[in-house]
Image (tube, helix red, strand yellow):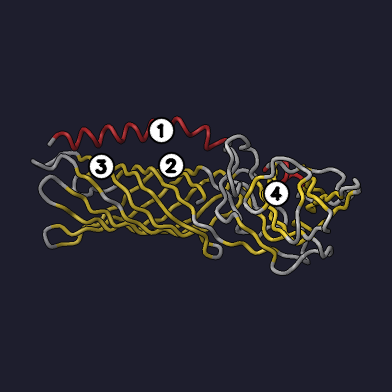
Amino acid sequence: MGRFQGRARLLSAVARAIAVALAPFVACGCASTPVVRTPVNRPVRPRSADADIELVEMRLGAKRPRKEAPELGFTVEVRIRPHPSESLARAFVAPKANAPCRGGVADGGAWIDDVLVAERPRRVRDSHRVELEFAYRETLDAMRDGSFVDVELVQEAGEARCLRTALASDPEFPLEARPGWSFGGPLRVRVPVTSVYNTSSATTFEGSLGRWVGPLYLDVSAGLGFGSCRSCPEKQDGFIGLPIGLHAADYVQLGNRYALGLGVGYAAIPALFPDHAIWFHAPRASLTLATGSPAPAGFPSNVRSEALGLELFAERWIYRLEGRTEQATVLGLGLSFSGAM
């Protein structure tokens, strides 16, 4: 029976070691290209003064990730209508101050009909949707004061034509976000403030699936954990926990690197002892500090990114014991990560 207690102590030690190792990473916000909860944004209505180009959608994140080009984390999809003799040459995300097709952030790749264009100029016949990839950080910098996407088409004779459409930061052409699913998971360590069936601590590993619903981020989670006890009665030296939970949080951006989330949730934790089982019901309130970036200029306000988060939470464990209801307060610390699907 001592193996339960041994596993619980080992997992608690591992959890503390991971938290200490990752604390500087979380504190400085040194995440790579952020993962974005709502990556796809589309025009509410047509937004191009040029009849030969139309913005279809923007995506904060690579639609088709490529190992050889990890910096390409911003995707723009446009529909272009070239003249019969024109070919696609290049594209830019250009600040408002730039003349059409005269510099900006050059594209790092173009996809036509789901095929990456290796050589350009490339002949484009009829109307086509073209996915253009750009470097993430440089593109967001270029969009701060308003920007355009420029597509340069060239004719066989060498003459060039520039198609331009507004990208973001244009109140006349608002964007709407299409919420996407994301996956992630917290590592949580719980310590009872008052006695909970002789439990001294519990550590859980949980996987979660969630998405934005209006201003709130909702997720469901399930996982596996181990608990240790103090002054253990005979044959009760620890338990295996199977937490299942629901959670909702509202995030507020703090500067350019952090987001603060206030959340509420509920977890059901079946605790499996060597010779019996108990159900813990645990309503939860949480405060999460996450690495993240604010919505770029012109994007919907609920476009937020999160790579890592540090969570402080309090739970009220409620359980039945020998025909009576017992309650106890539990405090906890969690370390979470997330990624877009």
Q: Residues within 10 Å of mark 2 (few under 14, many from 20)?
A: many
Report the residue at 80% width, 58% height from top.
Answer: 82
Comparing 288 with 136, the one in front is: 136
Pointer 2 residue: 335
Dots 3 and 2: beta carbons under 8 Å?
A: no
Pointer 3 residue: 226
The residue at the far bottom in this view is 45
Q: Earlier in the sequence, mark 2 or mark 1?
A: 1
Comparing 272 with 319, the one in front is: 272
Q: Secondary structure at mark 4?
A: strand
Cα–Cα gap, marks 2 and 1: 9 Å
Image coordinates for residue 216, horizontal then vertical, percent: 52, 61
Three-letter amino acid code at disc 2?
Leu
Q: Residues within 10 Å of mark 3 (few under 14, many from 20)?
A: many
Image coordinates for residue 171, horizontal then vertical, percent: 77, 64
Pointer 4 residue: 132
Cα–Cα gap, marks 4 and 1: 39 Å
Q: Secondary structure at mark 1?
A: helix
Dots 4 and 1: beta carbons under 8 Å?
A: no
Compared across the picture, whether 146 is left or right of 292 comes to right
Cα–Cα gap, marks 2 and 4: 35 Å
